[in-house]
Amino acid sequence: MTCSEKDIQDFSLLIRQLLLKYKETRQELREVKKLLAAQEKSVKDMEMLATASMHDYDMLKAARIMEIGDGDLEAARKHVNKLIRDVDRCITLLTEQQDGL
């Protein structure tokens, strides 16, 4: 079995096409790796931003809880006094029911 010049040229052409495709694939791989690194950096930045935002939110929530204005204090005092009156009324009703039995 002899190889003709045509067969050798065809084989040589296929080898060159494969090498070219290999180089293109390696270049695509490099680009994809760069893109992946950029995306990973972006994700880390977003995670840091989310963590900082949650911390800020927690601090604001704690500050709001600690902040009691005069109006809030007076409203709370009125609410507690109303609850005490309701409890006293219930105790009175229960006492009257027991005395009636």
Image (cartoon, rainbow, N blue to C red):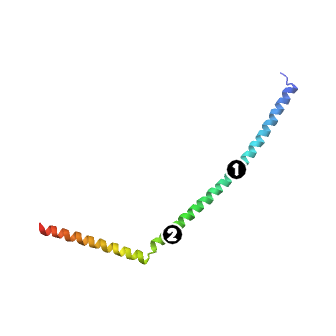
Q: Residue at x 86, y 24 (%)?
A: 4
- Which amino acid type is shown beneath numbered disc 2? Leu
**SS class, disc 1:** helix
> Depth check: 39 or 13 in front?
39
- The residue that disc 1 covers is 33
Mark 2, residue position? 60
Q: Residues within 10 Å of mark 1 (few under 14, many from 20)?
A: few
Q: Residue furthest right?
A: 5
Measure the alpha-carbon separation of dots 1 and 2.
Answer: 40 Å
Please name whichever residue, 8 or 43, is drawn nearer the observer in this view of the structure: 43
Residue 69 lies, in percent from the top left, at 44, 76
| Foreground residue among 83 and 1 | 83
Q: Is residue 69 above or below residue 22?
A: below
Q: Are marks 1 and 2 in contact (CB under 8 Å)?
A: no
Question: Is 42 or 68 nearer to us in this picture?
Answer: 68
> Looking at the rendering, in which quadrant would you find the C terminus?
bottom left
Decide: is 91 above or below 37.
below
